Image: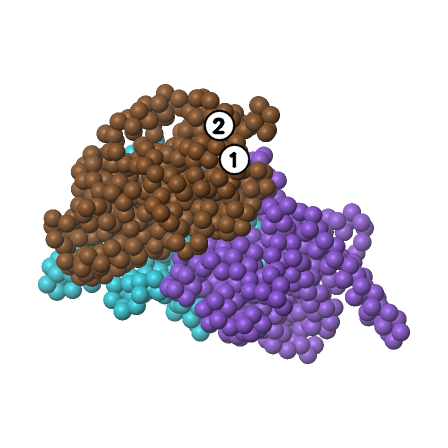
Chain colours: A brown, B purple, C cyan
Amino acid sequence: MTQAGFAFARLLACAAAAVAFAAPAAAQETIKIGVITDRVGVAKPYAEPVTDGLVFAAKEINAKGGVLGRKIELLIEDDQGKPDVSATLARKLVDAGVVFIQSLSLTTATQQAQTVSLETKTPHMTPSNSGDTLTTQIQNPYFWQTGPLGSIQIATLMSYARARNYKKVAVITDNSDLGQLIAKFFRGGLEKAGIEVVTEEVVPRGATSAEPQMQKIRAAKPEALFMAGVMTPENVLVLKAYRQLGLKTPIFASYNLSVPQYMTAGKGFLNGLAFVDAYDPDKPEIRKFTAAYKKDTGKEAYNLHGYGYDGMYLMADAIRRAGSTDKEKIREAMQATRNFPAIMGAKGMTYTFPEGKRSGFDPQGMVVRIYEKDKQGKAVHVGAK
Amino acid sequence: MSGDASVLRASGSGEQAGRGVWAGLALWLLAAMLLSGVAFFLSSYYNDVYRKLLLWVALALSYNFLFGISGQIAFSHFAFYGIGAYSVVILLFQANLPLPLAIVLGVLLCVVLALVVAIPSTRLEGFYLGLATLAFAQLFLVVLNEGGSVTGGAGGLANYRLPPVFGMHLTGPWYTVVIVVVTLATFAILLRLDRSWFGRACRAIQDNEVAAAAMGVNVARTKIIVFTVTSALAGIAGMVYAFVDNTVNPPIFGLENAFLILFMVIVGGSGRHAGAIIGAVLLYLLPFVLSPLIGHHHALVFGVVMLGVILFQPKGLIGIYDSLRGRRRAAAGKAPG
Amino acid sequence: MQDFLELIVGASATGCIYGLVALSFLLMTRPTGVINFAVGEWAMVGAFAGFLFLSEWEWPYPLGVAAIVLVLLATGWATERIAVRPLVERGAPELAPILALLGMLVIFRESISLWFGPDPHPVPYPFEFARVEIGPLFGASLAGSNQSFVIIASTLVIFFLAWWFFERTLWGKCFEAVAINRRGAALMGINLSRVTSLSFAAGAVVAGLGGLLVAPNISAHYLMGIPLAIQGFTALVVGGPGRVEGALLGGLLLAFAEQLTVRYAPVPPGYAFGVPLILLIVFLLVRPTGLLKAREARV
């Protein structure tokens, strides 16, 4: 009952939030923002908290008077984790008159939705996706990304591990698109620093065991193991095989391992695992955020909520600076964003879109944390220097 | 569909046939204009939904011929959809071939691969054939995922657009016209095949292979031709799809959709073209309608409906329609059950 | 050498899971000719039942397993009653129950996803996770997680029971009779519908236990069904649907082929996953009866 109960309550809360925004005032008064999320598919465990954070932020903003004197109205659509549905929904949102689209679903879904934002010249962003190629594969001046890029993740991990002077490491990932992308950037970052990747292994979706892959890694004798996968069951398989084969190689994991799910699914296997995160629980802004969130919804917030919260505030700020809901003006204002304070990331981190670039997460803004027993510990390292 | 009646008339003799053919052609043209014309009145979103609906109809029609009329269970239909889509993109933008050549080569690739699958599979029965095609479809996904920069790997290919055709950039409602034409052409081809001796041979094989062979039908060859033709038609639909969102990636061509197309054909009425059309329209549009009501678990509804249809009305929705109209169609549409 | 011996244990465990799924297929296909592709979802039901009884409600393990077996029996029986019996009684074509079961597959999966959500859910190990070593053997030792040994042992027990059922009991002979000649068996007074019910119930238990055994490693999640069904069916085709032992043999061969390829073959890791698919295709085309031939009808 608990699981279904909570899910249903969350759904109700979201629906209530959406309804609350459904223009009690006349339609022209509100600023319509489109949100594409995944409520039922493979991205749900990640998309849902981000959405909750975003909705909460919108509520806060509206309580303080909204943007440009107008309230924000959220039009939330569910793409079920399917990229082509995501594109269709983007069109639906544009037709409904949104001035900005937030993509909170899978990386491939966000990619496919870009066809629409490019075609219709609608500002579009993702606050949570971390695939580097989202802003580089398609030249779409209307799209921004403030999620922690794979390249930033590896740079931060490498900076943390620099003192150990690794020469040979291994990478393991899964066969999802994001997992492959992150592995690619991990590998790139490592090789650029002159570190040899002795083997790169893949655990496919639906595998029942990661032992052969881990055996291969053991045989290659790396000094460290980098985990780039993003699927929970498969990552847990890796950790179990690691323990079972008696491996002692230090593990450095992508930000995927920061998701609280692992503390139940991977219980007992996490101790000592270092992972990169965009969340510092000691940061005053985070403390303020989690307290406010708890007060408002009665639930605990964690790192994923923060992405949505920041994304909403960033966007609202851009609209404010644009001074109108004209899409072009919003685009210019968004691209001009400099040093916008973030609740995510290391202490003092801000979002900036450098000249000509559309990914805004500060390359020095991630932290490394370590699992202590099964709990996520403090930030032990900051930045990628 | 009006096409049916006109083709029947056209099978008359001499002068009658001559006039019948013109009448038939006129009807097809009218249908094309109507269906295309709608596109110009739809907003971008509805246009998108409409286009994808037309493609599903095309796929359902060809799948219906394979499964409902020839009785071959296959899960490879979406793989061929994907082969068509990927091949046209790769040939156009990586091999830099001109559009007509890319299309022809793409179709050829589908035909060759279909033969590769069909020829050894002729002696596989029922679900074993399904399994073999399922394995093929999964292999296709593995190849896509491992294809590195050729297939774009797990992320797929994006960032391309349809090159100008005869100097025109076909976008928006004009591209929808292309899709209408392709869908109607698919329908016309399948209808023609169905009405010919070939169609009768297929139904005979589905009924009773041994009897069909005894009557002089070359069973193996017929099965191979059906598989190849329907898979090629799926591939052509795929080529058209590639430029709808200007993106191709592995999830689009996954197993879920293979199940869905089977459900569509069965729920609509397997073995009947009208059934395939109804099934596709219904099951494609249903989630849009259901979402606001029951949330997003429309797949559950589909499973239940599919089960219900098999248990209670094996002839599908078109069967209900028939019995309501009191019509009886002889020798057409053999449904499972 | 150590790697190889460890791989033997690991691959055997995986092979046993595949074998269990294959056995489940076999239990239903032999007497009824119906191919039930929903066995993967039955394994999923077993895994989620494990989550409910053992993780959520924290029943003691043996009690939980007993409860899960009951749930599975009911599931199998209900599936047969809903999707198969009405069609068989009506004389529907062979294809119909198979398609109806595909509908059931979707219903199972979506229901579970609706009830529990799409997140993976943990299922506890029967014994605390630990590494077991048996050796020394050729200078190294056979080693693996204790769960692997639990899986192997349980599978052997289940297969033994299945074999004993078919070889030594009257009911087993009835199954064989129905498999060989349905009408003849009916004429001899064998209650066909009872055989069918029993075969589905047993199939559900076997598949569900397979799901329960593998779930502590991979967590229970709503997408786990289809990959298992595909692997299980491949195992069945490879080993041969004629004999119970064939299911286990096929499963082991499949798992070994998969894992040895990943470990030793100089092929990019992604391609190694084509191995089971290629095996399936090859066997379907070249030797559809599988490696072990069915027993001849004995007079």
Q: Are marks 1 and 2 on the same chain?
A: yes
Residue C224 seen by the camera:
no
Q: Point out the tag, 1 or 2, that comes first from the N-terminus.
A: 2
Question: Residue at 39% across / 54% down in the picture?
Answer: A136
- Are the two marked residues, 1 and 2, in contact with CB atoms closer than 8 angstroms? yes
How far across and down, in percent of the image, does residue B7 sit? 79, 66
Q: Amino acid at mark 1?
A: Thr
Q: Nearer the viewer, residue B141 or C144?
A: B141
Task: Say which chain tag 2 marks.
Answer: A
Q: Amino acid at mark 2?
A: Leu
| Residue A269 against residue A294 in the figure, above or below | below
Residue B104, image x, y percentages: 57, 73
Where is residue C104 drawn, in percent x and y?
53, 47
Mark 1, Cα crowd under 10 Å, few <14 / some 14-19 / many 20+, is some
Q: Whole-percent x and y of residue C97?
A: 57, 53
Which mark identifies residue A325?
Answer: 1
Q: Secondary structure at mark 2?
A: loop
Q: Give above or below for A79 relative to A133.
A: above
Q: CA distance from mark 1 to mark 2?
A: 9 Å
User: In this figure, which residue is indicated by the disc labeled 2?
Assistant: A68
Q: Which residue is at 34% across, 29% downward?
A: A301
Q: Chain of mark 1?
A: A
